[in-house]
């Protein structure tokens, strides 16, 4: 068998890629996790064998090809096993970010019509099983330390069609309700292949997954591991400096995730200038949020490692990526170049995309119709331009989305909830540039006459009580006499708010 990454990327399904990699390097580690004394490791061969047993256990529970299974699980070896077991069965899986709560989870379960729901039980002080009961979820089962188990001989043949929709991911987009993004094995394979071939890792590298495995980056990154045959350290709860011990112990060479990760590593480096924070580290890489050029230059000069940043979204997990051998100017000021097979078109300043890594659309057919133009290009809502060298420069967004630590946050969702507060007459929520988080959430409030003064603590307590996820809570509140508005339709001019409060 040809074991080159490019040959493996011809796999039609994710399960086919698993079986081909397991046959090539069965004893090499895939995942490393320090969640118990002595740590744990899962090899490529064990992934295939154990995922088949989990698939058989799920089959015994009634999961069949095409069955919709939702899971809301942290970044663990068991989560990957469950996901690949579902891929082996040909089920339709809908991952849900672990810190989502009743509003988002309930919406995902209803819209996807999930027949089963895997939860971690009580995790980080929150009872996910109790939430599932509140929501009336079907087929709830816990999948933290223990997974379903069975005899693989009962399993039907693995799926062979990589173009069928088998993944539903969730993104807030521009509306208050999340959108269900439809992916296939082939679109996820294409995204992961693009990432891998852009970063050019080797079998000697050691990667890291410090972000939620339920994020679109989960399969994106795992495909890269399967193609190149190297391991990654899993971090169930990521925080610096606590996680540094794991990075150092396993000799991580490739780290990152988003702009927030770069900033955190740089902050640790500045505690001991000149002493490498992770001696083995050679590359920081990621995407999901704007990358200030100054941050790039600081990482290069102070940490002594390369930084390559890219552009992706739930609908298209890998659009462009900076190449490690590109010039510093291009790495600092662009999002990189698109891989082979990704078409980028700029229409009236908007970035539009077509290619195998692009999703099939949304659960809502109306949203799908709006998202694609007549030639099949996805309208991203992002503004940008292409340089003479084919590198993409992003200049802004048409859609009203805040990207905080790589996660999309709907401004409208927060606004809709704050409008219910008796001390809020009108409100506009905007994203402001933030070196550590990419953007921070700022709520600008116009109060009604006679209202008690509103504080940030009041606003966040109210939003928590309304069920808003913690990661969406505003970090800043500004109270104004009147919001700036246009002269015709009296629409709030958010760009004026961004201009007024950015950098203050």
Image (cartoon, rainbow, N blue to C red):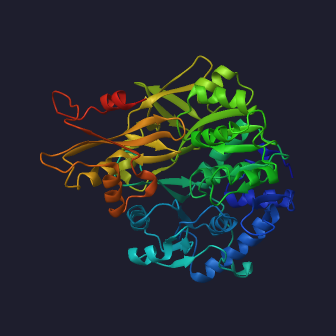
Residue lying furthest left: 449
Does any portion of residue 379 appear in the rendered image? Answer: yes
**437 displayed left or right of 244:** left
Above or below for 155 versus 321: below
Please report the residue visible at 33 percent of the width from the left and 28 percent of the height from the top: 500
Please report the residue visible at 19 percent of the width from the left and 55 percent of the height from the top: 422
Does any portion of residue 340 appear in the rendered image? Answer: no
Foreground: 197 or 101? 101
Report which quarter residue 272 is drawn in: top right
Report which quarter residue 287 is drawn in: top right
**How far across and down, in percent of the image, does residue 183 sit?**
54, 53
**337 displayed left or right of 24:** left
Above or below for 186 versus 339: below
Residue lying furthest top: 388
Number of marks in the rendered image = 0
Foreground: 434 or 293? 434
**How far across and down, in percent of the image, does residue 386 sit?**
54, 22
**How far across and down, in percent of the image, does residue 89 sit?**
63, 70
Please report the residue visible at 84 percent of the width from the left and 60 percent of the height from the top: 23
Q: In which quarter of the image is the C terminus?
A: top left
Above or below for 76 versus 149: above
Foreground: 7 or 291? 291
**How far across and down, in percent of the image, does residue 131 sit?**
44, 73
Report which quarter residue 92 is drawn in: bottom right
Above or below for 276 versus 455: above
**108 displayed left or right of 187:** left
């Amino acid at each position: 068998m040809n074991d080159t990454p490019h040959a493996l990327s011809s796999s039609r399904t994710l399960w086919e890629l698993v079986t081909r990699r397991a046959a090539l390097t069965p004893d090499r580690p895939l995942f490393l996790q320090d969640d118990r004394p002595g740590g744990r490791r899962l090899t490529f061969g064990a992934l295939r064998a154990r995922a088949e047993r989990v698939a058989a256990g799920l089959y015994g529970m009634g999961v069949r090809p095409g069955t919709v299974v939702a899971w809301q699980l942290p970044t663990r070896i068991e989560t990957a096993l469950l996901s690949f077991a579902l891929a082996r069965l040909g089920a339709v899986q809908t991952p849900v970010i672990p810190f989502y709560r009743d509003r988002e989870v309930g919406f995902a379960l209803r819209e996807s019509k999930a027949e089963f729901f895997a939860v971690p039980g009580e995790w980080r002080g929150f009872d996910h099983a109790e939430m599932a009961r509140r929501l009336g979820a079907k087929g709830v089962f816990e999948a933290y330390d223990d997974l379903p188990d069975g005899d693989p001989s009962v399993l039907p043949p693995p799926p062979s069609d990589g173009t069928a929709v088998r993944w539903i991911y969730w993104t807030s987009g521009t509306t208050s309700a999340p959108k269900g993004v439809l992916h296939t094995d082939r679109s996820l394979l294409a995204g992961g292949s693009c990432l891998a071939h852009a970063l050019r890792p080797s079998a000697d590298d050691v990667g890291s997954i410090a972000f939620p495995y339920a994020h679109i980056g989960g399969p994106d990154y795992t495909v890269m591991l399967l193609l190149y045959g190297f391991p990654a350290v899993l971090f169930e709860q990521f925080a610096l400096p606590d996680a540094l011990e794991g990075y150092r112990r396993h000799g991580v060479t490739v780290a990152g995730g988003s702009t927030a990760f770069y900033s955190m590593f740089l902050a640790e480096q500045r505690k001991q200038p000149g002493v490498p924070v992770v001696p083995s580290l050679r590359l920081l890489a990621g995407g999901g949020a704007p990358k200030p050029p100054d941050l790039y230059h600081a990482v290069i000069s102070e940490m002594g490692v390369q930084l390559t940043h890219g552009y992706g979204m739930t609908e298209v997990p890998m659009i462009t990526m900076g190449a490690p051998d590109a010039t510093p100017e291009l790495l600092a000021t662009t999002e990189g170049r698109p891989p082979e097979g990704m078409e980028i078109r700029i229409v009236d300043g908007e970035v539009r995309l077509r290619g195998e890594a692009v999703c099939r659309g949304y659960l809502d057919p109306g949203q799908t119709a709006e998202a694609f133009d007549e030639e099949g290009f996805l309208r991203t809502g992002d503004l940008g331009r292409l340089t003479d060298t084919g590198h993409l420069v992003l200049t802004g967004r048409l859609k009203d989305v805040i990207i905080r630590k790589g996660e999309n946050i709907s401004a409208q969702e927060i606004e809709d909830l704050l409008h219910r507060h008796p001390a809020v007459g009108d409100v506009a929520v905007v994203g402001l540039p933030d070196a550590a988080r990419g953007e921070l959430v700022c709520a600008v409030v116009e109060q009604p006459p006679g209202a008690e003064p509103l504080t940030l603590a009041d606003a966040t307590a109210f939003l928590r009580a309304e069920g808003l996820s913690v990661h969406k809570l505003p970090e800043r509140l500004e109270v104004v006499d009147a919001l700036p508005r246009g002269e015709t339709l009296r629409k709030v001019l958010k760009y004026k708010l961004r201009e007024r409060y950015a950098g203050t």
